[in-house]
């Protein structure tokens, strides 16, 4: 098994990544600004800020896989996602998988017009940050797993991950659980293609 680092480990997807990575037998370094995860065998928590690239590089030292689960929270300064992605790229890990929003960047053409319209209206200030972060990860040969709206719940028993050319055409993307997204990211990290955008679907 591998040593895995999770960036944004205190968030909904990040905490699921930590839990599932440990259950798969990986050792995990959980990185967040304010670590809040309970102790567990194989887990090390690290406090680090994405705007401190040296601190992120130190936290990532010795890890084979980096899972970037950074999200935006109310009050976050501009550029959090891009700063995190660039800090990861600068650290030079061998394998990176990050979470992204379906309908942005490379997947914009695969999404329906309603998705694009809603994203541009309700995520106007966040879109450039998301697009730039994805571009940084893809540019270093990493993988971006893009998803539609997320919710709490278990891993979907019918889940699948597809390339952009196989995304079902819908008015709006299907809602997917945080746990399903985490499972898709781990699958991609362990055996998925590199340098591509994938889409996690509940079925």
Image (spheres, rainbow, N blue to C red):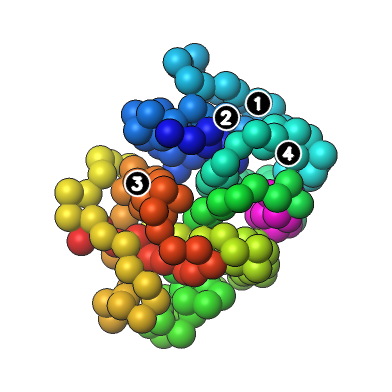
3D distance between C-alphas at marks 4 and 2: 11 Å
The local crowd at label 3, few if under 14, some if 14 to 19, many if 20 or more residues have their Cα within 10 Å, is: many
Q: CA distance from mark 1 to mark 4?
A: 9 Å
Name the main secondary structure of what is drawn in magenta.
helix
Question: Eyeballing the image, is 79 above or below 178?
Answer: below
* Mark 1 vs 3, N-terminal side: 1
Q: Which mark is residue 46?
A: 1
Question: Which residue is drawn at the image coordinates 57% and 21% (left, top)?
Answer: 44
The quadrant the C terminus occupies is: bottom left
**In x, y percent, where is residue 125?**
66, 66
Which residue is disc 2 drawn over? 29
Q: Residues within 10 Å of mark 2 (few under 14, many from 20)?
A: many
Which callout, 1 or 4, points at the residue further toward the start of the chain?
1
Using the image, tell me which numbered label, if any, was put on residue 56: 4
Which residue appears at 60% of the width and 50% of the height?
A: 94
Asked if labels 3 and 2 touch by Cβ distance under 8 angstroms, the answer is no
Q: Which badge, 4 or 2, comes first in the chain's sequence?
A: 2
Disc 1 vs disc 2: which is toward the camera? 2
Q: Quadrant of the N terminus?
A: top left
């Amino acid at each position: 098994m591998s040593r895995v680092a999770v960036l944004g480990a205190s968030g909904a997807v990040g905490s699921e990544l930590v839990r599932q990575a440990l259950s798969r037998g990986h050792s995990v370094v959980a990185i967040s600004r304010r670590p809040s995860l309970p102790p567990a065998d194989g887990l090390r928590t690290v406090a680090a800020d994405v705007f401190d690239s040296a601190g992120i590089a130190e936290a990532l030292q010795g890890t084979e896989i980096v899972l970037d689960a950074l999200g935006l929270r109310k009050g976050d300064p501009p550029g959090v996602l891009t700063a995190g992605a660039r800090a990861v790229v600068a650290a030079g890990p061998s394998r990176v998988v990050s979470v992204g929003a379906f309908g942005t960047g490379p997947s914009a053409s695969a999404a329906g017009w309603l998705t694009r319209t809603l994203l541009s209206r309700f995520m106007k200030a966040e879109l450039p940050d998301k697009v730039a972060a994805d571009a940084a990860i893809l540019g270093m040969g990493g993988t971006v797993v893009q998803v539609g709206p997320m919710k709490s719940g278990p891993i979907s028993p019918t889940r699948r991950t597809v390339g952009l050319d196989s995304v079902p055409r819908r008015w709006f993307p299907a809602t997917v659980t945080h746990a399903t997204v985490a499972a898709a990211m781990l699958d991609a990290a362990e055996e998925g293609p590199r340098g591509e955008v994938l889409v996690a679907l509940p079925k």
